Image (spheres, helix red, strand yellow):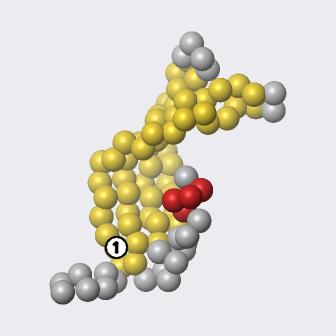
C-alpha cells in the first residue's frame, strides 16, 4: 500500500460495513471501500470501489493486518486525462 500511494497526491478512502470473523490463525475482516486516489498534480486520478479482505494477527501491542487483498468492483479515471482523445 505504501509503494502504491507514496507518489500520489490527495487521497480519500471511505471504508464501511466491516465484518469480522474468527479464523484458525486470528481474524478475517471484510470492509467495503470507495477510494479516490489523485496523482501528484491533483488534476487526475483513479476511483476504485470494492472490498478489502484482510487477515489479522494478534501481536503483543494489538491486532495487525498480515495480508490485504483488494477485490475490485469498479475502477474509473477521474479529472483531466492528458491525451485521452489523442
58 over 64 or under it: above or below: above
Q: Is residue 46 left or right of residue 1?
A: left
Task: Identify the residue at horizontal 81%, vertical 27% (top origin).
Answer: 60
Name the quarter where the C terminus is drawn: bottom left
Task: Identify the residue at horizontal 54%, vertical 16% (top origin).
Answer: 23
Q: Position of residue 12 (x, y in %)?
A: 52, 63
Task: Identify the residue at horizontal 35%, vertical 79% (top origin).
Answer: 79
| Towards the viewer: 67 or 44 | 67
Does the image show residue 68? yes
Q: Residues within 10 Å of mark 1 (few under 14, many from 20)?
A: some
Does the image show residue 20? no
Q: Secondary structure at mark 1?
A: strand
Q: Position of residue 18 (x, y in %)?
A: 51, 36
Task: Identify the residue at horizontal 55%, vertical 70% (top origin).
Answer: 7
Q: Is residue 84 left or right of residue 3?
A: left
Which residue is label 1 attached to? 78
Amino acid at each position: 500500500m505504501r509503494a502504491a500511494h507514496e507518489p500520489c497526491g490527495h487521497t480519500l478512502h471511505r471504508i464501511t460495513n466491516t465484518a469480522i470473523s474468527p479464523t484458525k490463525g486470528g481474524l478475517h475482516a471484510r470492509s467495503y471501500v470507495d477510494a479516490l486516489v489523485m496523482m501528484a498534480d491533483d488534476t487526475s486520478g483513479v476511483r476504485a470501489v470494492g472490498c478489502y479482505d484482510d487477515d489479522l494477527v494478534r501481536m503483543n501491542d494489538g491486532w495487525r493486518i498480515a495480508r490485504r487483498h483488494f477485490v475490485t468492483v469498479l475502477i474509473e479515471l477521474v479529472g483531466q486525462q492528458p491525451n485521452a482523445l489523442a
